[in-house]
Amino acid sequence: MGKNLTSRSEDYSKWYNELVVKADMAENSAVRGCMVIKPYGYAIWEKMQAELDRMFKETGHQNAYFPLFVPKSLFEAEEKNAEGFAKECAVVTHYRLQNDPENPGKLRVDPEAKLEEELVVRPTSEAIIWNTYKGWIQSYRDLPLLINQWSNVVRWEMRTRLFLRTAEFLWQEGHTAHATKQEALEEAEQMNDVYAAFAQNFMAIPVIKGLKTESERFAGADETYCIEALMQDGKALQAGTSHFLGQNFAKAFDVKFTSKEGKQEYVWATSWGVSTRLMGALIMTHSDDKGLVLPPNLAPNQVVIVPIFKTEEQFEAITAVVNGIMTSLRGKGVSVTYDKRDTLRPGAKFAQHELQGVPLRIAIGSRDLENGTVELARRDTLSKETTSLEGIEDKVVNLLEEIQSTLFERALDYRDAHITEVDSFEEFKSVLDQKGGFISAHWDGTTATEDKIKELTKATIRCIPLDAQLEEGKCVYTGKVSKQRVLFAKAY
């Protein structure tokens, strides 16, 4: 199965597209630009959801749900947000179909069923949520308001790629209201930290925490915090964003509260989100020419056990041992499956589980029963070892932890080896073309320079790293004074 994949070195984009489909994660749908997430892909997303949801609730957030449709008048209330998303909006103008008298058996839009006001299919939910918050917030006692929703959104993309960019995608979006600017800033930073912790501890992806430049900020935000990851092809991927919205939406929707001092004040706001784009990041960070490589903390099946037998008696004897192993592993919190299908040979099963990135495979046959052993195969290193059945449960738990750590360290080594400091524009272009990755360079702080570099190289400022040291220098393009380096890269 994996042998049929185009290699990454031959065509990285084609490799990615083939892998998503062949690993049975997702496929294109009958709706242009939209995808069907298949059960195996959705199982990974569910694990992501579960961990993120737990982390959100540990930081005091609650889940709610808001409408898919946003009246146009609400959507345009915050001008920067409306302008930023206007070109990507799907709009509902009618509410009914009818039989087409000119084409029997076909339907047409009923011209008499035009909506009094158009409805925007949400590209993001700030407008409908802040209109709602106006009725929820009256006093400082109602603050902070910490709400998250899991939902779908629609952004009318013309060039799509499974998980990375689709017209409809799944995500979560947090929307919070606070009494002070400082509280809101701390919330935005905290949620960016939550995303970074999730990426590193569960996805095994090292990320750089930073601030977006003014031109790259979320429409309607005063600041956008982000986490940036680096894929194996040297391109960056924005893996999460958290926005300090100031009082922009509170003023647009007249959301005020009575302070402890009895004064009427506008609330301060944040919003933050990650999406199924994380699935693309997971695939492109770890996987190889044989297929998916999944970190154990997010793998639907952390362990698969494959029996090797010739007779029914052998199968029953192996199964009796396997049942005991599975019970013990599940007791230790390990997700394990027993692949006892009789429609595939062991070799075909090995290939499928390798393609789908199962972190650890256990093969057990009649001779293994006699010897009291099993064969363990790691997906990350493709190494195999024969080990004793005695203590196998602890061995498996330790190996899964080692695989998780190994994947992170491997990605970190790659990332760190692909952060290159440059001081001239010629060097900038050379590194971008020949090496890729993040380029650390001085920038004069102007949007004009940022736009010109993007025009000439297709590289954008991915972020201003939060841990960046102040360092006097000269802009890599204009030679003007700069106080610190920023990170450029080509990106998804």
Image (cartoon, grey):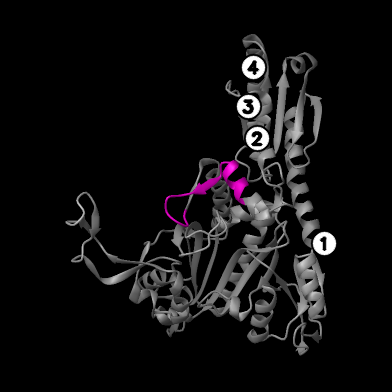
Nearest to N terminus: mark 4 or mark 1? 4
How crowded is the residue under tag 1: few (<14 C-alpha within 10 Å), some, or many (20+)? few
Q: Secondary structure at mark 3?
A: helix
Q: Identify the residue under disc 1.
A: 417
The image's mark for residue 327 is 3
Q: What type is the residue that disc 1 sits on?
A: Ala
Residue 27 is a magenta residue: yes
Q: Identify the residue under disc 2.
A: 353
Nearest to N terminus: mark 4 or mark 3? 4
Residue found at the very far bottom of the displayed protein:
480
Nearest to N terminus: mark 3 or mark 1? 3
Which residue is nearer to you in this view: 343 or 467? 343
Q: What type is the residue that disc 2 sits on?
A: His
Q: Secondary structure at mark 4?
A: helix
- Give the residue drawn at x 81%, y 82%: 471
Distance Cα–Cα, label 2 vs label 4: 22 Å
